[in-house]
Image (cartoon, helix red, strand yellow):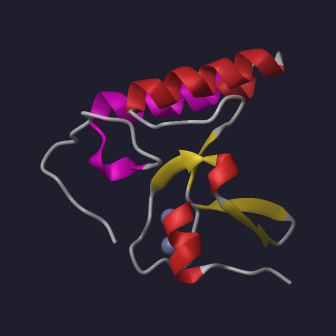
Amino acid sequence: MTISLDRPVHHSTAASVSYRTLAPRQQDLFHRALKAAADATNVWHIKDIHEFTAAALGIDIPRNDELVECSCEGCPDNCDAIAPLSLCAEYLDGSVQRPQCPACADDHRITSD
Ligand SMILES: [Zn+2]
Ligand SMILES: [Zn+2]
């Protein structure tokens, strides 16, 4: 269930946003923020970066949470939602833990064995 708009409308915060609906500047900001968070050595800096990024993208994120991109496999919607990790389901892809956004987890949850 993806609603496509010609341009993103961010009048209020949302639980998640679709990456492809973001403006190029916001997509760039998201990548740079994730890289900054990956390079940060202080956990509180990492949390701050995620909180600032969520605010910039109009995502309502719980405190001390992190933003992740949905990596739902074989997704019928080709989902690219960015959502708070605490709201996502996680599944194992080999030995790697991958997040599945709340909408995907509701609709077609991946269970790992
Ligand atoms: Zn999905
Ligand atoms: Zn998803």
- Magenta run includes residue 28: yes
Q: How many marks?
A: 0
Asked if residue 32 lies left or right of residue 47, the reply is: left
Residue under the image location 77 percent in, 17 percent down: 44
Asked if residue 23 lies left or right of residue 33, the reply is: left
Residue under the image location 62 percent in, 79 percent down: 109
Q: Nearer the viewer, residue 113 or 38?
A: 113
Locate residue 10: give its quadrant.
top left
Q: Nearer the viewer, residue 13 or 40?
A: 13
Locate residue 9: give its quadrant.
top left
Asked if residue 25 lies left or right of residue 97, the reply is: left
Q: Position of residue 54 (x, y in %)?
A: 50, 31
Locate residue 77: give its quadrant.
bottom left
Q: Quadrant of the N terminus?
A: bottom left
Residue under the image location 21 percent in, 59 percent down: 4
Q: Quadrant of the C terminus?
A: bottom right
Q: Position of residue 74 (x, y in %)?
A: 52, 80
Asked if residue 16 lies left or right of residue 73, the reply is: left
Main SS category, magenta section = helix
Vertical comparison of 2 with 13: above or below:
below
In the rendered structure, which segment of residues is drawn in magenta?
17-36
Q: Position of residue 96 (x, y in %)?
A: 81, 61
Q: Position of residue 106 (x, y in %)?
A: 55, 75
- Magenta run includes residue 45: no
